[in-house]
Amino acid sequence: MYVGRISHPDNLPSHKKAIAPKEKMFTLTGMQDIPVPKAIQTKDIPTIIDEYRHAASLAIEAGADGVEIHGVNGYLIHCM
């Protein structure tokens, strides 16, 4: 079973390694390799919270009744 980059070999059959995507992604400069993400630092968290807050306020300004953050199963907000 493929469980993505956040899987651990102890939880995979025969201790296989986690698999990163091998495909490329489209950017304004053409197709690029998908970069390896960096670990989040504690100092980054206030900025990320502000970005969530700003996105929510824009959605409400655009007419949304409210905002629900999907935050389980490895999404960023679940990891903080």
Image: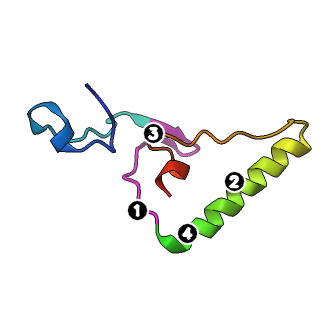
**Which residue does the image show at 70% across and 39% down from the upper left?**
68
Q: Position of residue 30 (x, y in %)?
A: 51, 41
Q: CA distance from mark 1 to mark 4?
A: 10 Å
Residue to which mark 1 is pinned: 39
Residue 13 appears at what percent x and percent y?
Answer: 13, 30
Q: Residue furthest left?
A: 14
Task: Give, as a single range, the part of the protein colored magenta.
Answer: 25-40
* Residue lying at 86% horizontally and 36% vertically, measured from the top left: 64
| Residue located beneath label 4 in the image | 44
Q: Kindly identify the amino acid type of the residue bearing the numbered disc 4.
A: Asp
Q: Is residue 39 magenta?
A: yes
Q: In this view of the protein, which residue sits in the foreground, 27 or 19? A: 19
Q: Secondary structure at mark 1?
A: loop
* Residue type marked 1: Ala
Closer to the chain start, of discs 3 and 1, is: 1
The residue tagged with tag 2: helix, strand or loop? helix
Residue behind mark 2: 52
Looking at the rendered image, the disc whose residue lies closer to the viewer, 3 or 4, is: 3
Look at the picture and state if 13 lies above or below 66.
Answer: above
CB atoms at circles 3 and 4 under 8 Å apart?
A: no
Expressed as whole percent of the image width and height from the top left, the position of residue 10 reads 16, 43
The residue that label 3 is drawn on is: 73
